[in-house]
Amino acid sequence: MNLIPVLIAWPLLAAIVVPCIRDKRARGVAVYVGAGGVMTLALGLLAVWLAGGKRDVLLYPETEILDTAMLVGEVLLMGLIVFLCVRHKKYPVILLSVGQTALLLWAELTRPDFTLVDFAAQIFGPLVDMNTELMQPHMRVDCLAMLMVIIVAVVGGLICIYAVGYMKAYHHHHADVQDRSGFFFSMLFLFLAAMLGLVLSESLTWMYFFWEITSVISFLLIGYTRTEEAVRNSFRALWINLLGGCGFAVAIAVASRTVGTTQLSDLVNLSVWLTQNQPALAAVTVVPIAMLAFAGLTKSAQLPFSSWLLGAMVAPTPSSALLHSATMVKAGVYLLIRLAPALAGTMTGNMVAFIGGFTFIAASMMAIAQNDGKKVLAFSTISNLGLIVACAGIGDEETIWAAVLLMIFHSVSKSMLFQAVGSVENSLGSRDIESMHGLLLRLPKLTYIMGIGIAGMYLAPFGMLISKWVALKSFIDADNYLLVIFLAFGSATTMFYWTKWLSKLVSLHHTKEEVHDVTRRDQYVSMSIHAAATLLLCLLFPLVSQGVVDPIITQLFGESYQVLSMGVLTTMAVMLVSVLFVPTLMFLLTRSAHQNYVPIYMGGVNEGDNTYFVNSFGEPEHLYLSNWYLRFEFGMRRLMRPAVYISAGVLVVMLCLIVGGAL
Amino acid sequence: MAKLAKSPWLLHYDASSCNGCDIEVLDCTTPRFDIERFGIINTGDPFQADILLVTGGVNAQSEAVVKQIYSQMPNPKVVVAVGICACTGGVFKECYNIKGGVDTVIPVDVYVPGCAARPQAIIDGVVKALEILDKKRRDYAQARKSGQADEAEGGNEPWNT
Amino acid sequence: MQAVSVILYLILAPFAGALLDGVSRIVSARMQGRKGPPLLQPFYDLLKLFQKQMIAVNSVQMLLNLSYLVFLAIAGSMLFAGADILMCLFILSTADMFLIMAASSDSSPFSSLGASREMMQIMAYEPLTLLLSVGFYLTTGSFHVGDIISRPVSAIVFMPGFLIGFFVITAIKLRKSPFDLSTSHHAHQELVKGLTTEMAGPTFGIMNVAEYYEMILMLGIVALFFLNENWWSWPLAIVMCLLVFFLEILWDNVSARVKWRTMLDSCWIVTLLSAGLNGLILMLIQ
């Protein structure tokens, strides 16, 4: 377990060293080493942990110096934010930052000598054997944390490797943007370090520190190009995430005073215990849990806070990939999954579930109207996170099973899709889905990768769909019919926007435009590993379910739960055979069949080939086929505002009820 | 009828007709004449058609279209020229823009005269075409067995010339 | 027993589907005051299609069409094997994905538009199919077809609303008016033959066989509403399937094709009102 400080320090070191290297080639190598190191260390940690018997490991009970250092760090972060806000004249943001930092400092520095033991004594009266010193670990390695470490390190590391090739091409295309790749890589690594720290933290104050770092780094990454739009979007991301940070700070302040603990699992366990055994006292944990859930909602970009993630698209693709797949937004859902046992059946849980379900359907509808590939991916991220959040809000074994699986599959597929879109953009000079017509003939390798990613997002038998299925079942079991409806309609709209993208890719349209694949080898390495992982996760689905997800459920809920019956697993095998073997077989069959090729039907007026036809003036006209975007029906302009109003209304009213009910 | 083709699908193309014959072709699908009795479907798609029904003489504009549509029909296939214009060019034969009957562009199997051709005559012509279609089908099956199907039937004209 | 039922489905479904298609064409013709084709006309059509020359506009269409057929057959087999109905419906939509890709691969104006409309149709009917399986789960406590049909009381008693909704979306799946947007059995539609425009001869034959599998699958789901543990529910279910099929033909003949917007709106509203309310009531009375 001594690996943990190394694991966090290594990307930190990389973040310091990489920008100091001026030579591009050497810097690339340094990034490879850094990313490879992170992955190796994470896998090493996994090996050590597995060898230790997959135990729930608690670490670092005494960390006074570090605690102080973190407080100083938080003040420095606040200083940085204030400085940047003043420079860009965004004064209201200062209030949020200063407010929460002040609150936290006050909570930490004037913390009364009131611990969980004292709280227990209030309930039971003084107990003799409880006088022992309570262990206050700051870090915890359990199944969920370990899973997150692997996701962050491997997916994040691959994104860093991808970024080396990507940034070269990016600056080749965007000559107007100042080349600050060194800074960019540094931020990527810093992000990984913060994220690793976050998922391993058990103490809320530590978690808060890492939480704030990710907020600030995402702000710096989004503002990379320094254009007016980038600056505006980066500040939007900042204030929304700081708002969530405020919730976090309030939770810490309240929890330390009412129940005397700032340990996440203590808080959750206490809440569960009180609801079951002492419902009259359960109100004390409601406010901190609700505030933490609120922070989780902002971080995972749920409505009404989705706009920051949409604005984050202005940054270079690796940072979007990082924000969307492995880190940032996953921090939000990670926190919510941790909270899930305490959310089950409570009003806070209902609020989270509603917001999640509503976001799922609203975002998937708005995705239909987008023709920018990255925008579609962004909406799809928000929508899928909505589903995960809804599962966490329901908070029983089945839903968490689905949530964890969704998280795994989403991380891998989404990271791959972002990388593929980024590479296509570098080659085509556009990331418009319309310009991807017939991409299969122009950039076949990238198209296959993109196709696997898209299929992984919504087609049977890939994991996303199975998880969705389990989610549906558990929503019914939880008697939440509204979520069932959201899921039914949301699946239909999800299907629509993915299918039309996929059908654009497979159009066999021969154009004379020459396209040069400028994707570099390191980018392909990263994407191929993702593609292989997607396929493997699908193939090994039952093993993933048994070996990874079931232990997580056991640790969170104390008992394991058999979600999938064996019959279903057999079905999976059948489907897999059909997906892999049937098309292959048919491919071989049809290849041997003799076919005569004729032109496509255009009323008999093709002009020589399939790309031109004779128009009514007798002149050749280029054939242009467009997808449906239904902007009037599903456009952002039409849906965004009502969606934000509804979700914000529900959020405010329910938060008021929750907090009011608790007081 | 035992040997006749039982599922001939039509494609109707108006090369330069005055619409007289076209209306009579549509008339065949009405309850009064009901060509679906013979399993005939008026499909609009050359890819799925067996019989190409052309009305009107071929002019400079429609020539390429007739050729292309014909090339998009899978073998075996037959062509029926409906109305006197489609057969020979009719009263427009001497016009500067008319090439003549359909057979100046593609091979025609059955000629249905009349101005406009009566529905009964059209159905009669189509039934005649069925016999030819049946023969072609047998020839095609035989040719396919011997492995030179598309050469035997003349194949598809190179469509991009 | 399961294996027998699956094999029977795989062998008989195309024949039953073609026969029903023949019946529907005669019934339609009679409704329009015509005599109509012979009963076995669909068989003649299929036979002809498989005898024709293989022409194509690209090399992958045949492959994708075959995948469509195979996936439909798998989906149907799952239903007739008594397996999970939700899984069956998911595979059904995966099958549809292959049809859409087959049509899009042509990159031709008519088939691309047809493919887009097919997507729209899926979007219109998919909520109901998902809710339908939810309804069965709420009524019988299981997603398994085997459990659903071995209850003492038919599911229709608890879920009449779902049957109404399912009737509406069956019109989409059987490509009947008013919802035959993507491709139609009738001549003269605005998109030529919609998404099947570039499918010729054997390729189109495969597509037709797949549609027959789908037809039997849909009617099988209708039967699920009526089947219970008693023997007499089987003839009842068959009669009801035929009735539903007849009503679909009637609806086909008395209505005009609608625009996609009307289809989407009406299907979603019907889904919410029928399946949504019915499901809510089921959940409340539990």
Image (cartoon, rainbow, N blue to C red):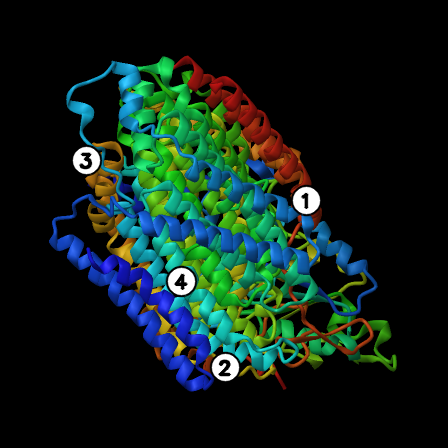
Q: Tell me the kind of residue under disc 4.
A: Ile
Alpha-carbon span between mark 3 and mark 1: 49 Å
Which mark lies nearer to you, 2 or 1?
2
Q: Tell me the kind of residue under disc 2.
A: Val
Picture quadrant of residue B87:
bottom right
Q: Chain of mark 3?
A: C
Which mark lies nearer to you, 3 or 4?
4
Are the numbered discs 3 and 4 placed on the same chain, yes or no?
A: no
- Observer able to see residue A452: yes
User: Mark 2 or mark 4: which comes first in sequence?
Assistant: 4
Alpha-carbon span between mark 2 and mark 1: 37 Å
User: Mark 4 or mark 1: which comes first in sequence?
Assistant: 4
Residue tagged by mark 2?
A518
Q: Secondary structure at mark 2?
A: loop
Q: Which mark is residue A452?
A: 4
> How packed is label 1: few (under 14 Cα within 10 Å), some, or many (20 or more)?
some
Residue B44, position as x, y percentages in the image: 64, 59
Q: Nearer the viewer, residue A537 or C175?
A: A537
Q: Secondary structure at mark 3?
A: loop
Q: Secondary structure at mark 1?
A: helix
Residue tagged by mark 3?
C1
Q: Nearer the viewer, residue A171 or C11?
A: A171
Residue B20, position as x, y percentages in the image: 81, 59
Q: Chain of mark 4?
A: A
Residue A648 sits above or below residue A170 on the image: above
Q: Secondary structure at mark 4?
A: helix
* Quadrant of the rendering where the N terminus of chain A is positioned: bottom left
Q: Tell me the kind of residue under disc 3.
A: Met
Residue tagged by mark 1?
A633
Are the numbered discs 4 and 1 placed on the same chain, yes or no?
A: yes
